[in-house]
Image (cartoon, grey):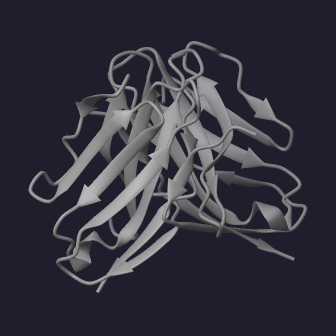
């Protein structure tokens, strides 16, 4: 059963620490997205990759956040240094290169708490 | 930029009854996709139903159906024979058929099922 895998599921850290979240997209999917979900802002797009190339990271705070795809099976989202306002659920999603479907498949999310 | 509006933060329905969740969107594009995603307490984002804008026929998936009014830019979700397992947050989402493949989400509607 193909699915998007995210780690960790939960992370509690102290302010100022580095946080790395990882995502394994569904095999064969060539678009990968990072979303952040908070009560106040809802679901916001942070970054978007196509064939491992970043296409849109306009929603990502550049001073502390970075997103990469070292290879087709791994996407990472890094926060350094972390702040309490970064506390949220971070979702990774992937999609096939088939625009007629339009559907994105989501991982279970990583809940981050920054103290 | 496209926007998606869900004007009902919360809805409730008696078990076995029918409920309709509202969604409107704003776009200047003629071709796009619309989706309803369900997010239960497990926080997994699950696709409920999708609609291609070029199709006039409303999509249906078992107990779930949509009323797609392209001219009015309206996309409501009807859940028939509501079940306890339908309790969740429901998000309406928009995706362009060309260019940026990101999903733009509404703020969500929390659906409660009354036994």
Q: Is residue A32 visible?
A: yes
Residue A46: percent from the left, percent from the top? 29, 48
Compared to residue B59, the image places residue B66 above or below, namely below
Compared to residue A68, the image places residue B59 above or below, namely above
Q: Residue at x 73, y 46 (%)?
A: B78
Between residue B111 and residue B71, name the one nearer to us: B111
Residue B99: percent from the left, percent from the top? 33, 18
Between residue B49 and residue A69, name the one nearer to us: A69
Residue B6: percent from the left, percent from the top? 48, 53
Between residue B61 and residue A63, name the one nearer to us: A63
Between residue A106 and residue B30, name the one nearer to us: A106
Q: Is residue B23 left or right of residue B50?
A: left
Q: Residue at x 56, y 12 (%)?
A: B54
Task: Determine the image quadrant of residue B35.
Answer: top right
Residue extending farthest left: A63
Q: Residue at x 53, y 45 (%)?
A: B92
Q: Residue at x 90, y 61 (%)?
A: B16
């Amino acid at each position: 059963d193909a699915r998007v895998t995210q780690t960790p599921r939960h992370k509690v850290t102290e302010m100022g620490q580095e946080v790395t979240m990882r995502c394994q997209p569904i095999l064969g999917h060539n678009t990968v997205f990072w979303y952040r979900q908070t009560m106040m802002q809802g679901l916001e797009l942070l970054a978007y990759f196509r064939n491992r190339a970043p296409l849109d990271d306009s929603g990502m705070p550049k001073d502390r956040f970075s997103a990469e795809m070292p290879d087709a099976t791994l996407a990472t989202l890094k926060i350094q240094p972390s702040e309490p306002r970064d506390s949220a659920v971070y979702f990774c999603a992937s999609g096939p290169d088939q625009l007629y479907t339009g559907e994105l498949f989501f991982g279970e999310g990583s809940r981050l708490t920054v103290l | 930029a496209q926007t998606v509006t869900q004007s009902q933060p919360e809805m409730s329905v008696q078990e076995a009854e029918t409920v309709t969740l509202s969604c409107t969107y704003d776009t200047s594009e003629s071709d796009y996709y619309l989706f309803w995603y369900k997010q239960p307490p497990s926080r997994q984002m699950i696709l409920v139903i999708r609609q291609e804008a070029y199709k006039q026929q409303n999509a249906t998936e078992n107990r779930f159906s949509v009323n797609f009014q392209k001219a009015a830019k309206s996309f409501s979700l009807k859940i028939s024979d509501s079940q306890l397992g339908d309790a969740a947050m429901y998000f309406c989402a928009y995706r362009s058929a060309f260019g940026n493949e990101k999903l733009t989400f509404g703020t969500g509607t929390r659906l409660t099922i009354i036994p």
